[in-house]
Amino acid sequence: MIFNSVIFLFFLPISFFIYWLLSKKPLKVQNTYLLFISYFFYGCWDWRFLFLIAASSLIDFTIAKKIKASSNKNTRKALLGGSLAMNLGLLGFFKYFNFFADSLVDLFSVFGFQADYITLHIILPVGISFYTFQTLSYTIDVYRDKIEPSNSIVQFFAYVSFFPQLVAGPIERATNLLPQFQKKRVFSYDKAADGMRQMLWGFFKKVVVADSCAIFVDRAFNDPAASSSGELFVAMVFFAFQLYGDFSGYSDIAIGSARLFGFDLKQNFAFPYFARDIAEFYRRWHMSLTNWFKDYVYFPLGGSRVGINKKLRNVFIIYLISGFWHGANWTFIFWGFLNALYYVPLMLFKRNRRNLEVVAFNGFLPSFREFYAILETFIVTCFIRVFFRANTIEDAFLYIRRIFSFQGNTWGNLDKVAIAVIIVLLVVEWINRKEQHGLAIANRPVYVRWGMYMTIFICILLFGKASDSFIYFQF
Amino acid sequence: MKKYLIKVSLFIALCFVIVTFTMLKYGENIDYFYNKFTTPQAKSMIIGDSRGMQGVMPSIINKKFAGSDFELPMFNYSFTIAQAPIGELYNESILKKLDKNVTNGVFIISMTPWMLASEKENDNHKGEYREAGEPPHNIRFVNMNPNYEYLLKNLNYFHFQALFRKSSTMHKDGWLELDNLPKSPEVFNRWKNTQSEIFDRMIDDYKISEVRLESLDVLVKKLKAHGEVYLVRMPIDLDFLEKENGYYPSFDKDLQVIADDNDIRYFNFNPVTDTIDFKTYDGHHLDKNGSAVFTNLLCDSILKYNNQSLQNAGVLR
């Protein structure tokens, strides 16, 4: 089941009503119900992979308890190693097996050997990268004594499979989400109303912005040779909005849905296209993943409190792993590498923590310098993203070469609707850039709020496109 | 919670009003099929694929047959080749749309070889049909206005932007009128090439289905209980006709066999003669004028055939 489907429009209200009807029952009943609907939500895609989630949850539940119970350092380490091996092993098998097999065959052929292997047709279970990281963080946090292991298997299973964020995040930490399963949720009007607003904005970003841009983007990226330089440039910029609308839209719907059930998930996007440098950009883009890597990889490697060489090594490791997390393809690794290259000068000149505050915090419009910095960051990230979108590294280089060949003098059959909705997106998000999401308008007058709700609904009705997936499902 | 429910209900109610208004006022423009499911049960029907949906105009038939014994009005219940090839699913839907009290209706079945073809990987004997899951087979209610069931199950078919830029009109009688048709030979040729590619793809991917041919026979028999049935092969450009005949050489013969078995008439309007201007906009589908010319000719042919039959039977002298 996906958020932008008719079935979800029925699933959500029905689940919501039953959930709050059960609010007077014991906590265990509420959690069992959440577990049931979450498994139903996931099972609508492929019920067979429910066993994978259940197995992953059960192993981490058991290992975490054993880690807590043990006082022997080596035993604790071995148990943590077991959890890491199991989680990363599953991820590696389902996501990376074919990649490594292909790469190995290619490597052999370089040396003149013809290697054969059996290619398995492995289906990537939706959301495996997300829930694996979530269970991993739980075990690591228990190991680090940051959190007590859960005593309730239902609570823990519900935490791992919580349906709003199960398939594409935000990647929640046990320290934030698990305690919310340990106490009864009480209905809050403000929280639920704001959740609805965030969901509405998420739907707008997904079905209007992302899916409108997708048509133009797909055409250009599928056959760059058939497009003019102008078309390729526009498609590159549209891809930025497609990706943002798709993924941040999903996050908004997820966070909003969770709020309807009384849960607070972490913010996942904080208006990244208003970032003034790449460091700020990644503090605002897919924040749950960035913070995960920071806490569980970057800091353990020494972070930035080490010598310059190690600092550089750590930056490259983080960005390369981040690229690899996105998919089993060299394009993602190269994309990560380019991000690291772009980040390194900032770090060397100690300018990576220059822009911690929201842009134009004390005013409405940015200064010229800020505007230029925003534009530059945006354009450079767009070029780097060509590697993220292209099928191969060669395709990406061809794409960029064609942009700079200035062939053809057209901008293509530009979709005016796509341009208009991008402008609406940017204006609304700029106005609310200090808030948690683009439609955080609880304090505005009632006519502004309702005017916005109905305008967005009409936009969705008029300009919404039907797609049957989200980009980040493949990761 | 009460305050929340009131406000959410208000929001949903407003959305509902907007959607209902749009469907009632602009249903003919925002979806190619929607209007077909908002009309009462039909007394007489045109059945077929996109060729029939655009090429046979019920309004002309109603005028031509006015004063006859036929139970009218005529309704065009054709779709496209993706939704409605002949088969048990389409038969079921046709009978759902049909007014069962009718005994003297007119049923024009516009046939193409593709309507009797199935994708190679589909085994029709096992009930595997490409059209399953598509409208009209995925809805229960075919006579409801506004039709919320169709909206919910086929949301992806709607193009609400047509409120600003109309590209088609699905008339209440089921005839699809397309706007923005090619005005220059270059565009015509481009559209024709696209159609040609579609034909080539179907030739590669589809096989003739005995099950569908049997379903056609079943359909004819069922419709005969409610009136007169006519099988029709509509005119297309010669090069497309060659492709079709190459793909299904015994098509005309098979249809004639079914027609003879059921004592009905098969009208084959191919190959097109130079004396009649059946203008298509892509070599395949008749444009508005071509449809009018063709429908008039079809009506004349039916009337002529009926008169002949009556004369033969000694009713007319």
Image (cartoon, coloured by chain):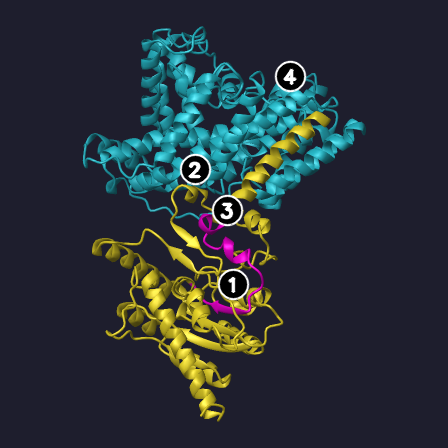
Q: Is residue A403 left or right of residue B24?
A: left
Q: Nearer the viewer, mark 4 or mark 1?
A: 1
Q: Earlier in the sequence, mark 2 or mark 4?
A: 4
Instruction: In the picture, one chain is yellow; tell me its letter.
Output: B
Residue at coordinates 34% horizontally, 14% vertically from top-left?
A: A371
Q: What is the span of residues highlighted in magenta in the rendered image?
A: B25-49
Q: Is residue B29 left or right of residue A391?
A: right
For residue A78, which numbered disc appears in the image? none
Q: Amino acid at mark 4?
A: Lys
Per the image, the residue denoted by label 3 is: B25
Query: What chain letter is assigned to the residue under label 4?
Result: A
Query: What chain letter is assigned to the residue under label 1?
Result: B
Q: Secondary structure at mark 3?
A: helix
Task: Let me know if residue A330 appears in the view.
Answer: no
Spatial separation of the CA atoms under disc 3 and disc 4: 73 Å
Query: What chain letter is assigned to the residue under label 2?
Result: A
* Mark 4 burial class by Cα count in 10 Å: few <14, some 14-19, many 20+: few
Q: Is residue B179 magenta?
A: no
Query: What chain letter is assigned to the residue under label 3?
Result: B
- Callout 1 touching callout 2 (CB < 8 Å): no
For residue B129, which numbered disc appears in the image? 1
Q: Is residue A448 left or right of residue A148?
A: left
Q: Secondary structure at mark 1?
A: loop
In the depicted view, which residue is nearer to us: B306 or A410? B306
Spatial separation of the CA atoms under disc 1 and disc 2: 30 Å
Per the image, the residue denoted by label 2 is: A211
Instruction: In the picture, one chain is cyan; tell me its letter.
Output: A
Q: Amino acid at mark 3?
A: Lys
Q: Nearer the viewer, mark 3 or mark 4?
A: 3
Per the image, the residue denoted by label 4 is: A73
- In the orientation shown, which residue stands out farthest toward the front? B67
